[in-house]
């Protein structure tokens, strides 16, 4: 537990000084407040008892000074606590986000997206609020407890023995509560993950939900996870609230005991009324301190549950490492697979790709075809090291991909993924993702090659048109062409089109293919496609089936001698005839 707390606070950075300032202000404030009951007891026992009005006014003035100083220190502690808490929260979120950017696809697969969002928002907020709202009682409670107990024993040691009975009772109750509530807080955060996942899925696929009229089903599904969150939250907070009941039981029992025994002492003359009044003031401060400390333990318990989830993200081992990289660059774009095997998880029983041997010459156009689930996308994702191979060798320009710096490798290999993504902002801003320093002429040339210039001229604001979140303002085919243009702006040595023209008509696809061949003859082009017409003009075509290469050759060669290719061709020909 202490190691986790130290780890979390290590992200305080420049905000550590505010933690120190807040702690000093809170400690000083507590000491000034502790003086007030002592002064009040002197006023009653000396000033009021002897009728000494100047003494009463003098002590009253000191009480006022202590109160004003405590107020100023309280304001300072609140300010510094807020700065420390918000600063720590900001640093934790930034650290998580930086870590996200280092994740490979396998790392992202390890966590659900909804869980990563919760760990970066709700979990960080829990820790942030624990600092902003918990630093004051965390510092004030122990100071008030120790000091008030010392003063109480100095006033009447016999009466203060009551605490020796009350403290163990409260300690046992607090231990049992925190021990059982901590796993409940962890389950509660997991339930928040589920709620976020359902919301994310529904909003992402809102068009599908409406098209299939599944709104009521989605409402029921959300109701289940929402009720699950409610149930876990109720269990956690019900158990946490028993701390208040235990505290009140101890508090009122202690007060009753002190009044009972203190009244007897006054009756026999061993204690004065002013002493009992001052003693009760310190008793209340001690009990309030105990209540603050118990609440801090509960707050800390919840924060530790959130902290563990955050540390899991920060400690996630990046499976794609750069410990073998050298100072080399991709210059031509020749690719070679030598007996490559791959599976997503080491413990998986079967390989997704098995014994892949393939050579792609620099500047060649290679098509990859196969039935759905043949692992075509997985194969090309190995080239820019979105995943690492499990066995064998993958070389670019004769060097293993592990020797290329990731940044350079992924700059040299442009991938237009099967799922096209556009970001909020203008069309130009989306295109400049390929090269932020590209000139207007370069952007327009990339759009001409990709066939995007055909519709951009018809947009109301042209390149300044807002795309909306996810590119909702353009069609699927238009989105594909924008993504191709964005990839071309990188000026890559290798261009991978993963079924990236599936939403455009065959005539437009042919124009794009012709433009790529004429304008970019030295660029290695790998085209994954469902349609034979998309790859029939390629220099070579690779037939994949069940993660294995079942044939390599030109369209004519495969049509003459490869059964799988013949079946794909015949099925598409029949569909065209119909």
Image: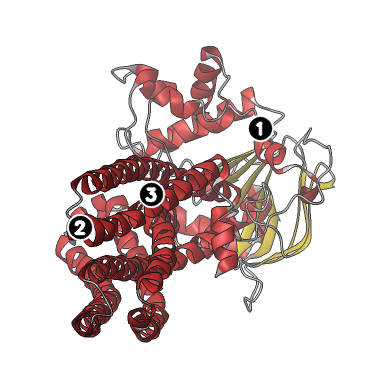
Taking the image as shown, residue 273 lies to the left or right of residue 498, namely left
Q: Secondary structure at mark 1?
A: loop
Residue sitting at 56 percent across and 17 percent down? 442
Q: Front-most of 413 and 127?
A: 127
Residue sitting at 18 percent across and 67 percent down? 217
Residue sitting at 41 percent across and 77 percent down? 183
Decide if residue 506 is in sight here: yes
Q: Which residue is mark 3?
A: 29
Residue 412 occupies quadrant? top right
Identify whether 99 is placed above or below 115. Answer: above
Q: Which mark is residue 576?
A: none
Q: Which residue is mark 2?
A: 50
First reached walking from the N terminus: tag 3 or tag 2 = 3
Taking the image as shown, residue 549 lies to the left or right of residue 531, namely right
Q: Which mark is residue 492?
A: 1
Q: Secondary structure at mark 3?
A: helix
């Amino acid at each position: 537990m202490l190691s986790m707390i130290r780890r979390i606070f290590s992200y305080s950075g420049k905000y550590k000084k505010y933690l120190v300032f807040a702690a000093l202000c809170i400690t000083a404030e507590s000491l000034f407040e502790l003086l007030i009951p002592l002064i009040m007891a002197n006023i009653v026992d000396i000033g009021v008892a002897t009728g000494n009005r100047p003494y009463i006014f003098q002590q009253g003035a000191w009480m006022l000074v202590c109160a004003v100083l405590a107020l100023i220190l309280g304001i300072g502690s609140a300010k510094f606590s807020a700065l420390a808490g918000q600063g720590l929260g900001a640093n934790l979120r930034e650290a998580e986000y930086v870590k996200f950017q280092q994740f490979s696809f396998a790392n992202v697969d390890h966590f659900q997206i909804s869980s990563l969002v919760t760990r970066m928002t709700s979990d960080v907020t829990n820790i942030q609020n624990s600092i902003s709202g918990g630093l004051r009682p965390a510092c004030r409670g122990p100071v008030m407890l120790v000091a008030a107990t010392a003063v109480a024993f100095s006033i009447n040691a016999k009466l203060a023995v009551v605490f020796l009975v009350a403290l163990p009772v409260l300690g046992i109750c607090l231990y049992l509560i925190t021990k059982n509530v901590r796993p409940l807080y962890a389950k509660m955060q997991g339930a928040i993950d589920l709620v976020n996942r359902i919301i994310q899925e529904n909003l992402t696929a809102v068009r599908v939900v409406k098209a299939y009229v599944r709104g009521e089903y989605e409402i029921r599904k959300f109701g289940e996870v929402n009720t699950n969150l409610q149930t876990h939250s109720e269990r956690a907070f019900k158990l946490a609230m028993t701390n208040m009941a235990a505290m009140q039981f101890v508090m009122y029992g202690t007060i009753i005991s002190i009044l009972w025994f203190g009244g007897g002492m006054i009756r026999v003359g061993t204690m004065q009324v002013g002493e009992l009044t001052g003693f009760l003031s310190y008793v209340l401060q001690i009990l309030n301190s105990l209540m603050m400390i118990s609440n801090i333990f509960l707050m800390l318990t919840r924060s530790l549950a959130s902290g563990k989830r955050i540390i899991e993200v920060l400690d996630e081992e990046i499976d794609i490492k750069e410990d073998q990289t050298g100072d080399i660059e991709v210059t031509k774009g020749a690719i070679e697979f030598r007996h490559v095997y791959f599976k997503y998880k080491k413990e998986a029983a079967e390989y997704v790709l098995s014994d892949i041997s393939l050579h792609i010459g620099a500047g060649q156009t290679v098509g990859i075809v196969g039935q759905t689930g043949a692992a075509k996308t997985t194969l090309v994702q190995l080239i820019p090291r979105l995943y690492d191979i499990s066995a064998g060798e993958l070389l670019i320009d004769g060097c293993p991909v592990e020797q290329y710096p990731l940044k350079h490798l992924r700059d040299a290999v442009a991938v237009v993924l099967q799922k096209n993504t556009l970001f909020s902002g203008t069309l130009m801003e989306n295109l400049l993702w390929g090269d932020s320093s590209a000139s207007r002429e370069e952007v327009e040339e990339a759009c001409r090659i990709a066939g995007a210039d055909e519709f951009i001229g018809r947009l109301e604001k042209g390149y300044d048109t807002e795309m909306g979140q996810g590119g909702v303002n353009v069609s699927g085919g238009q989105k594909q062409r924008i993504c191709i243009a964005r990839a071309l702006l990188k000026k890559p040595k290798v261009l991978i089109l993963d079924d990236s023209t599936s939403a455009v008509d065959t005539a437009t696809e042919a124009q794009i293919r012709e433009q790529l061949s004429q304008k970019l003859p030295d660029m290695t082009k790998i085209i994954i496609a469902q349609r034979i017409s998309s790859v029939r003009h390629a220099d070579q075509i690779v037939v994949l089936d069940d993660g294995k290469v079942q044939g390599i050759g030109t369209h004519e060669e495969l049509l003459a001698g490869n059964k799988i290719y013949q079946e794909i061709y015949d099925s598409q020909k029949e569909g065209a005839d119909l």
